[in-house]
Image (cartoon, rainbow, N blue to C red):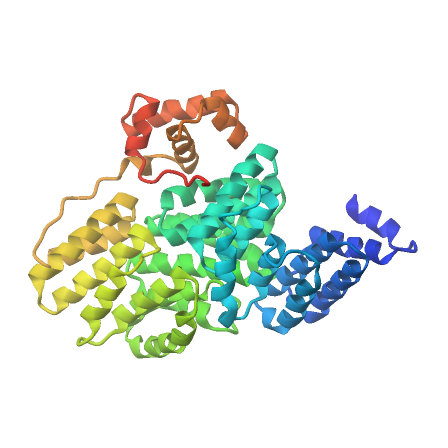
Amino acid sequence: MVRRLVAEAEPLPLSPLDLGRVAWIGERLDPGITGDPAAVLPLVKAADQVREHGDADLALNLLWAAASNSFWADKNELTRNQIEAAAARVPVEVDDPRVLAVLAYTVAPEGEFELAERVARRWSERPGDAASLQLLGTAAFTLGAHRIASDFLTASIDSMRDQGLLVQLAQSLVMRAWSEINLGRWSIAAPDAEEAASLALETAQPLWEAGAHAAQAFLAGARGDEARAEALASRAEAVVVPAGSRAVLAAVQLGRGVTALGVGRYDDAYRHLLRMLDPVDLAHHRMTFSWALGNLAEAAIRIGEAEHVRELVAGFEPRAAGSPSPAFRQSMRHARALLADEAHAEARFAEALNDDLSGGQFERARLQLAYGAWLRRQRRITDSRAPLRAARDAFDAIGASPWSERTREELRAAGEVSQKREPGVLEQLTPQELQVAQMAAEGLSNREIGQKLYHSHRTVGSHLYRIYPKLGVTARWQLGEVLDAPRPAAA
């Protein structure tokens, strides 16, 4: 219907503002991600024209479309200066959420740290509208500042639920799912990804649905369900390859790489992850490439490619030093520890384990596993057992069963036998049941949960009826005692 109406309007004598609105409507209907300057620069020109005619809001919408087109195709360097200069000409506050989001999509590496600080400062005076909160969350997410991204996105999600903004809600949930994966909070990421996939399907957003499936694939693979992980990864890949969405394909490759690492298929892991670091590969994207480094190093040392990856990691040192992304810096510390020679390895492991581990339990446990294995190979058998036990217990707690088994094998080689792992109570819940349990643990009533999730209160009650025996509880107040990570609440 919209296309028909636009086609009827285009032959009419349209003003510059009307032409800008037509361009914006076209982007909303079919957002391109070619990154081609021939598609991006007309949007920048249209933004300048509508700004000159007094519509700053429309100008920023057009610049957001231009920045998004360029960013998702990973070609922002071709149009960066033009977009940034046009954004600076729009008469709004310098730290307007729309401006910060545009800049996050176009900023050069040397400007990321300063921009991340500007985004973080907005938390103390954050706006109340869902759109601005989502833009700030998007900016923080793009810059790799996942803790502040989760805070902004959580606030946007709460507002979007209340207003029934399902299109935007799906997008915020996808981004928060990936932020929570980067923070190691899988019990939040899993229900976010499932709900996001459902909402994106219902609202006809195939690329966002693919992003949700990529997150689900990562979690399934890390927990040992290889068949489901590959099915979800292939489903996402079928959408994003024709569309040219590099960032989502990179996330797919990350999930495949981590899945292969967990079960010891190191050649496969190396092949999947190396694609993320090849600038000419469709699986390379500047937002996600850094996620590959520590994982790639782990695969490389098992298949004799350590020297090659050592050179790759060394090439990223200057960028990592000025990056605002804790995930990037953590990935570099992980890689340095694994690739260090015998004289420096212990110091590198200490550095990695004692620093801020933004990746939570999963990343800490992986470092402890690698450190314990290194100690055992140095014939420091007694010393190796403590980090290996800690890694085993952490993997058990989050349900990372392939990693648990790998750690048990290392402990057996160190002369210690572990009890067989029993599935945790939270692994018995579906993602939706986990989401309901988390909300109930926060004190929400069945009716309030139903309103947020667009279910009847009777459906919520049915979920809780199944949840209680699975968790071994009999009352609502007991839920908080068995849930390993509460859903983040906006401050």
Q: Is residue 14 left or right of residue 318?
A: right
Q: Is residue 347 left or right of residue 128?
A: left
Q: Quadrant of the N terminus?
A: top right
Query: Does any portion of residue 212 appear in the rendered image?
Result: no
Please state the horizontal and vertical placement of residue 356, each as a whole percent of the image.
Answer: 31, 58
Please state the horizontal and vertical placement of residue 34, each as a whole percent of the image.
Answer: 64, 65
Instruction: Say if 267 sits above or below 134 in the image.
Output: below
Q: Quadrant of the C terminus?
A: top left
Please state the horizontal and vertical placement of residue 277, each as a whole percent of the image.
Answer: 44, 71
Q: Hey, which quadrant is residue 436 in on the image?
A: top left
At x 30%, y 26%, the residue is 478
At x 56%, y 42%, the residue is 169
Query: Does any portion of residue 89 appear in the rendered image?
Result: yes
Instruction: Say if 163 sits above or below 33 in the image.
Output: above
Single out the residue that lies furthest toward the right: 13
Q: Is residue 392 left or right of residue 292?
A: left
Q: Nearer the viewer, residue 448 or 262?
A: 448
Q: Hey, which quadrant is residue 163 in on the image?
A: top right
